Image (tube, rainbow, N blue to C red):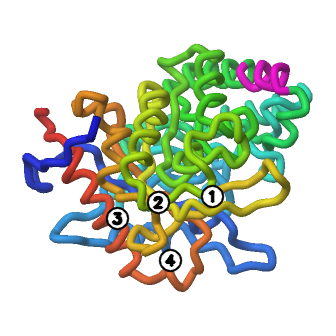
Amino acid sequence: MTIPLVVTMTSSSHIYPKLHNAAWPGLVGKGGDGEPPIELETLLDLTASAKVDGIRFDGIDLFVFDPHVDIDSSEEQIQALAEKVAARGLVVGTLVAPVWPPTGGGSAMGEQAERDQFLQQVEKTCRIAADLRSLGVRPYGCIRIDSASSPSLWTEDPDNNQRQIADTFRRACDIAEKHGERLAAEGEICWGGMHSWRRMVELLEMVDRPQTLGFQADMAHTLLYLLGHNAPEDALLETDHDWQNIELFYAKYQELTDALRPWTIDFHVAQNDATVFGSGSHDKTGRHCLPDDPSGKLDIPKAAGYWLRDRTGKLTKACQHICWDGCMFPNEIMLNPATWNNVLASMISVRDAHGWSVDG
């Protein structure tokens, strides 16, 4: 099946999905011996200032981590955050929970103390998310999590580790439900137990809480599920795939998206050049590209349709907002307003092809 890309309405008629930028590229890969982090207020200003044919970003997704958002924020600090966002005509969508050991969390398949740390970070993030919702600046969105574990460690005891992650995620669901939140597990090949599309589906089915735990599909990361870098047994394409063979690519992409689309509740527009980096034979991850990078392998609006429409071409409308994701870019690029106009144009192209009206 080929996803239909006929645009039947103008972008001005498309109310959904709302278009969001992401704040975490200002933190990921920054600090230490590298470039300094980019302040949240700077990213908010860049997001609010971007404009293409009269269309602006509707909101921003946040990383609950210093120096952007203190996970132990007081009510006054959360109020101040809400005011900063609202003052720029934006809203907040999905929040990234800092579940990893270096940020105060712990492995979802680790010892009990580590798993408790993981869940503590989920609890604190859900509290902030719920507070922002009650303050009127967060009308939709999820809490993003992963296993905070590496594929190399996971492979030491796959069955037991997968059960442990599933148990931790079920407990995380209990926490999320208490706060009226949903969790979105990010599909990326560097997270143990989530490092292949088949294992990701297996984990979601093991948790079996579809009303609370869904899948976050990032176009850059899910592309690498096809190549099986950390799970060769689940590869759908050869690692040296000829990218001129578009027909084969989309046939396999269909297989991938058919498996994960029913679980997808959060969606990242992104570009990828199909290369990986990282340490070891398992712990590889992908590189984001700018939307107009000539080495990018995705026709962004077309590929997005495989996630946002079912096999018949009908819109799923499962995501009220979509978010741009692109990390590890130099600050010079990120501080250039033209970068965000180009990103916004790419986001608009996805909504033009797969958006809907408020009445639709």
Q: Amino acid at mark 4?
A: Met
303 left or right, relative to 275: left
**Separation of marks 1 and 2 at Cα, in angstroms:** 17 Å
As rendered, which of 67 and 200 lies closer to the eye?
Answer: 200
Query: Marks 2 and 1: in contact by CB < 8 Å?
Result: no
Residue under numbered circle 1 = 286
Between label 2 and label 4, give the one nearer the viewer: 2
Residue under numbered circle 2 = 243
Q: Which residues are magenta?
A: 158-166
Q: Amino acid at mark 3?
A: Arg
Can residue 75 be seen? no
Nearer the N terminus, badge 3 or badge 2? Answer: 3
Q: Which quadrant of the rendered structure holds the N terminus?
A: top left
Q: Amino acid at mark 1?
A: Gly
Residue visible at 42% across and 49% down in the picture = 92
Q: Quadrant of residue 46?
A: bottom left
**Separation of marks 4 and 1 at Cα, in angstroms:** 19 Å
Nearer the N terminus, badge 3 or badge 1? Answer: 3
